Image (cartoon, helix red, strand yellow):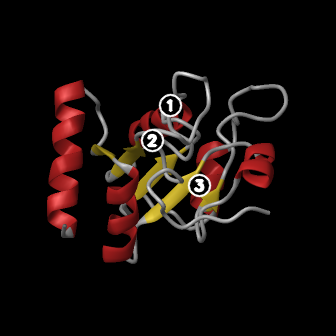
Amino acid sequence: MDKDTIIKSAHGRAVSEGLPYAGSLTPPEADRLRQADPQAAIVDVRTKAELNYVGRIPDAIEIEWLDWPDGRVNEGFLAELKAAGVGEDRPVMFICRSGVRSHNAALAAQASGYHQVFNVIEGFEGDPDENGQRGKTSGWRFHGLPWHQS
């Protein structure tokens, strides 16, 4: 799947869901987009604890959306995004555990002037299965995409 096809598919999901940002990507699409476009940034918005204990995506920019352990929105999130070199015209893909925090990060980035904002649905671990375990039915790791543990 080429870059344009991925973006068109992601945009179609956003339109059907009434989302204001550029699109919703599956984890495999996000990985293909970052391979196809060297300017595309993946921003992992999970907490440092999650990154340390659950795993990391190689070359992802790591900026907490919610502070740990308080659970408050990181007021410096957008400033940290810019400080990390993610300009408003670069494609930026947000990922978290399941796609909820990354959706909120995508909304904030889009509202602040970012033009090519995507949410990675399913997230890193995906939704829980019937036993309440994540990573068994969906998510970055489930799809066998690159990751490592600290």
User: Of the residues tagged 3 and 1, which is closer to the observer?
Assistant: 1
- Please tell me whether residue 143 is drawn above or below residue 3 in the rendered image: above
Residue at 83% across, 26% down: 70
Outermost residue on the right side: it is: 69
> Please, what secondary structure does the residue beneath circle 3 have?
helix
- Please tell me whether residue 76 is drawn above or below residue 88 in the rendered image: above
Residue type of the residue flagged with mark 1:
Asp
- Please tell me whether residue 90 is drawn above or below residue 98 in the rendered image: below
The residue that label 1 is drawn on is 127
Residue at 58% across, 64% down: 60
Residue at 31% across, 75% down: 36
The residue that label 3 is drawn on is 81
- Please tell me whether residue 65 is drawn above or below residue 57 in the rendered image: above
Q: Are marks 3 and 1 in contact (CB under 8 Å)?
A: no
Residue 79 in the figure: left or right of residue 140: right
Residue 32 in the figure: left or right of residue 130: left
Question: Mark 1 to mark 2: distance in Å?
Answer: 6 Å
Residue type of the residue flagged with mark 2:
Ser
| First in residue order: circle 3 vs circle 1 | 3
> Please, what secondary structure does the residue beneath circle 2 have?
loop
The residue that label 2 is drawn on is 138
Residue 43: percent from the left, percent from the top?
55, 55
Residue in front for this viewpoint, 91 or 127: 127
The quadrant of the rendering that contains the C terminus is bottom right
| First in residue order: circle 2 vs circle 3 | 3
The quadrant of the rendering that contains the N terminus is bottom left
Question: Mark 3 to mark 1: distance in Å?
Answer: 27 Å
* Category of crowding for the residue at label 1, using alpha-carbon neighbours closer than 10 angstroms: few (below 14), some (14–19), many (at least 20): many
Residue type of the residue flagged with mark 3:
Leu
* Category of crowding for the residue at label 3, using alpha-carbon neighbours closer than 10 angstroms: few (below 14), some (14–19), many (at least 20): some
* Category of crowding for the residue at label 2, using alpha-carbon neighbours closer than 10 angstroms: few (below 14), some (14–19), many (at least 20): many
Residue 99: percent from the left, percent from the top?
48, 36
